[in-house]
Amino acid sequence: MQTYPRRVRECIANEPLDRMKKNAAFSWALLVVFLWAPLFSAQSAVLTLVKAVRLLDPRTGNVLSPAAVLIDGDKIKQVGSPTQVSVPAGARIIDLGAATLLPGLIDGHTHLLLDIVVPPKAESERHYNGEFSPGLLLSVAESPSKRVLLGAQLAREDLESGITTVRNLGHSGIDGDTELRDAIKAGRVAGPRILASGRKLIAQGSYFQSLNPALAAAILHQEFLLVNGPDGARQAVRENIFQHVDVIKVTTGEDLSVAELTAVVDEAHRQHLKVAVHAVDSNSVQTAIDAGADSIEHGNQATDAQLEQMRHKGTFLDLTPTFYDGFFLKITEPSIVLPAAAHDAEVSAAERGKKRYEEFVQRVLKAGVKFSAGSDMCWFYPGKTRGEASTAAFVNLHQAGMSALDVIRAVTTNAAEMLGWSDRIGAIEAGRFADLIAVAGDPIVDSTELERVKFVMKDSQVVRNDIVSH
């Protein structure tokens, strides 16, 4: 057996203890770094100052000129004139010159995992099997992976057009929009902040009808949750909650009872979720009001008495002026030659619809009901990105008779209130997310400036800047 001098033997004997002490010290050092690193990082993070000639506050309609916005991390820290906002040394400065700053836009009703191509009229007629079919059916029959990748593209296009938050209301498969939401939140994909609804709750037959029995159940299960009685309504809400949704979407008509919809609302509210109800005709609108819906989507045939009920109850009306002024012809004629009779019929229908919607907008404004706006964009629009198509839908409200300021409110402050996120988005104010956009002109004078966003920032990250820095 090998022997060592006494001092060497003592060193060998104490080596495990010394190693443990060193390891413990190293572990404590790592723990300190782990606990304090975020603080050090926050202290050393470069602040950002955004300057522009004008800043519009949608809530008040006031314009701050000139304006400066100081951003710390992903939140707005201070807003004021350049002389009021102190600029720390080393801050990143973004000078947007003569531009007008606005809060990031909010699309209260969209479908990021749908991009429906309208089929030729003969195909639509021969293969008709329900609302939006067969175009909708062809879209939802795509593989889930393909659809979510398409959704990622459409989300990026929305963001690039200044839409920094969306509420995605169905037609995303079982978990397409919740997974896309999480990927965007984790920074793996560029896109707006998403409130996801998962699958729509419907009564059987609301959308697809007369499908192949061997396929029908699978298609319906992928896209919808069927409501059969109040207990079934509660179970449908719970299934969506299992997918970690942010909001519940229901399509209602004469096939869904007040008792069933009330059960949906009660269960959702018990789980602290809002309920958005698709309701177009007056009977459906009344069902949604009586059941306590948080927002009524579309609502085009709501009566004056129903608008008054909504105002009294604080129910939001989410306007969707998508088809105003001949939208159907705009998305079909670039690729489909319509028969002359069909074209003339569409022109006449568009004119009638245009007049009805203008009257509806005036009744909404007169009633004083809370309103927001959504693009309801789920269509392939030749020549436009998804974001360009969506912002064009917002501007339709101005063409229909709403003031430019009210249009801006509908997609900023009002929409933020409808979502329950007034403390996070919808305004350029201290403490809110640093979601800013800028247009070259004055959107109050020319509402179409919303279609030409030049600068986009979300969570303090610049997504787009087509304005030459001064």
Image: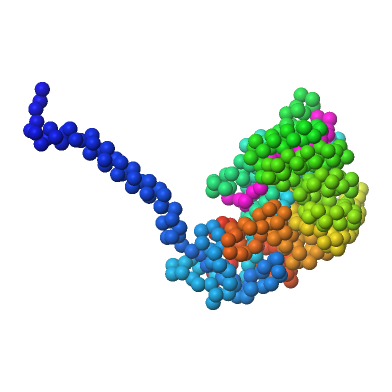
Residue sitting at the far left = 5
Q: Nearer the viewer, residue 295 or 150?
A: 295
Q: Quadrant of the N terminus?
A: top left
Q: Nearer the viewer, residue 73 or 267?
A: 267
- The quadrant in which residue 175 appears is top right
Question: Which range of residues does the magenta coloring cover?
Answer: 190-211
- Which residue lies at the image location 72% right of the left edge and 44% below the top edge? 269
Q: Nearer the viewer, residue 297 or 213?
A: 297
Q: Give the x, y percent position of residue 333.
A: 80, 50
- Which residue lies at the image location 15% right of the left edge and 36% below the top edge? 11
* Vertical placement of residue 257 versus 153, above or below: above
Residue 266 can be seen in this image: yes
Left or right position of 143 against 293: left
Is residue 201 magenta-colored? Answer: yes
Residue sitting at the far top = 1
- Which residue lies at the image location 62% right of the left edge and 52% below the top edge? 192
Q: Nearer the viewer, residue 446 or 39?
A: 39
- The quadrant in which residue 198 appears is top right
- Which residue lies at the image location 43% right of the left edge and 55% below the top edge? 39
Residue sitting at the far bottom = 83
- The quadrant in which residue 141 appears is top right
Query: Coloring scheme of the render?
Result: rainbow
Q: Quadrant of the C terminus?
A: bottom right
Characterize the magenta stretch by its predominant secondary structure: loop
Is residue 131 magenta-colored? Answer: no
Q: Give the x, y percent position of residue 377.
A: 74, 50
Q: How many marks?
A: 0
Left or right position of 156 against 449: left
Q: Give the x, y percent position of residue 427.
A: 65, 62
